[in-house]
Image: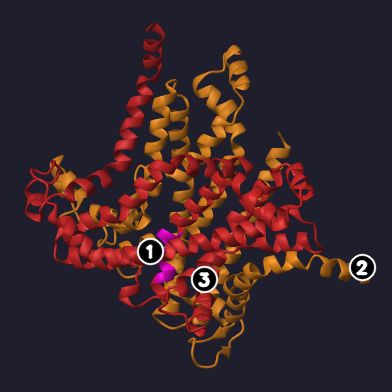
Chain colours: A orange, B red
Amino acid sequence: MKSLLEEIVKKRNCYLLLLPTFVLLFIFEYYPVFSAIYNSFFDWDGFTSPRYVGLNNFIQLIFKDPVMSVSAKNITILTVFRVLIAITIPLIAAELVFNIFNMKIAYVYRALFVIPMVVPSMVNLLVWKFVYNPQYGLLNKFLKIIGLSSLCRAWLGDFSTTLYAILFLGFPWISSLWFLIFLAGLQNISPDIFDAAKIDGVTGLNRIRFIDIPLILGQAKLVLILSTINALQGYVGIMVLTSGGPGNSTMVPGLYLYNNAFYFNKMGYACSIGVILFSILLLLTYINLKYIRSSEESQ
Amino acid sequence: MNRKFKELKHDLLFHIVITVLVFISLYPFIFMVISSFKTTEELYHNFFGLPSYFEYRNYADAWREVSPFFLNTIIVSVITMVGVLTLSSIDAYVFARFIFPGKEIIFILFLSLLMIPGILTLVPRFLVVRDLKLLNTYWALILPYIAGGQVMPVFILRSFFSSLPKELFEAAKIDGASESQCFLKIALPLSKSILFTVSLMNFLNTWNEYIWPLVTVTKAELFPITVGLVVFQSRYSGSATWGPLFAGYTIAALPIVILFLFTMRYYIAGITSGALKA
């Protein structure tokens, strides 16, 4: 016991060097985690003294709050759609660039696909807001030109189209980050494997199916986990485009949490939404990780 | 020549599909830049075409509106970047080079932050900042950014520092170098490119923050570019003044796009190494 203490005293500089970071982390990360969980059991406006309500916030949210049920439905649709997109379309783009013989042009294409990532995301959202503008927007103007003006509408103001407009945002959905992750995976496959495949007559789509995809499963699962996390807690896009409207038809849990905390002053209730999202994320990540391990072992 | 032709024949279909995809992906931005040079009247009767002449006044108007926000974002991003880089390189060095009781537990504690979604901690962190009386100051942004922005850099730098040959440090020690000299004169200079990568990623993250400044900064003179652009947007699209609006968007996007065109190599290297480690 004494030697451990001596060791700690001897290495005190290590702890001192880590101290500034951990002080910051304690104040702005660790404490808020516990505070969020603690506050989720209280009815609290953030100013007066909190009132303990047990599991009432959760019961209210899961069984009785119609806005939360709409949010849950919307986020399920959005997440399933975005995750499916994330693991297919950027992979197709990466395969296209990867299969080009001319390396110089492939390099240029890669740079072009990365540009959307470095345009500030807010600029991207605001430009898309203009795309959907009912009077002047790009989409309605385009429909008029190709003779489909009957389809023109206020895309973000119409109950029947708003959610689809949000799904369509970013078309053709080649996320730079997922694209780069897939491309890195493909470029990391040893050329010997491709040579061997070629000799065995495995080419084209067969090669992609039997060689490329099994060898980039690691990357695919990374994209799966990250895109699920992003999609489930994301709400900036909806906040900027529709504020959850019209009505509450495009409300999502993240935005509902924000509104509860900063418009309705329901801090405890907002924390409960956060805890529910956190639990779902933990569960999904756990399932993902378990699945990754088992599928890699089976190879 | 024959080889070139064969190459082209093989690539042709790919070129067509990729060009179409790139064009559609980038078209909103192309439209934004083209429209930023048109007067509002011209946008109405010449919607898709090139501008008949360049209306530079759009940029003067837009710059007057967005430059204060722009400056705020640069101040906050640079201070955050310096803070993150300083702290995370020291932490990573300690984790990579020393053995001390509790090291594993401390590192796991650190990594556990990867599992904490920002949405869970948003409200309590706001209350912390409010109770520390930091609302409506740059520190309300900078301090939490420095805290949360360190996880990935420490993770990346630690594995880089561990990969440096131990003999280098031992030789320096024999020559009488102190541990801080080893860090400043050996470890840091050898990690220039990875440090650069890490700083770029951090810079871009700070640049894109929207929700946090929205709740912690309510004074317009402290708004970062993201929040400022939304204010600017609602004013100018309300009055349908499109030319200056698109000029404002272009001003907000251009410096970052140019910075990254020159440094793309480092940025892609960072993502690639991350993707392969996974």
In the rendered structure, the residue with mark 1 lies on which chain? Answer: B
Which numbered disc covers residue B143? 3
Do residues under tags 3 and 2 come within 8 Å of each other at their CB atoms?
no
Residue at 59% from the left image edge and 35% from the top image edge: A216
In terms of secondary structure, where does tag 2 sit?
Answer: helix
Q: How many neighbours does mark 1 have within 10 angstroms: few (below 14), some (14-19), or many (20 or more)?
A: many
In terms of secondary structure, where does tag 3 sit?
Answer: helix
The amino acid marked with disc number 2 is: Ser
Majority secondary structure of magenta residues: helix
Give the residue at the far top of this rendering. B2
Q: Which residues are magenta?
A: B206-213
**Label 2 in the same subunit as label 1:** no
Where does residue A147 sit, x and y in percent of width and height? 13, 41
Which numbered disc covers residue B73? 1
Please name the residue that numbered disc 2 is placed on.
Answer: A3
Q: CA distance from mark 3 to mark 1?
A: 14 Å
The amino acid marked with disc number 1 is: Thr
Foreground pick, B60 / A219: B60
In terms of secondary structure, where does tag 1 sit?
Answer: helix
Quarter of the image containing the N terminus of chain B? top left
Dividing the picture into quadrants, the one containing residue A237 is: bottom left
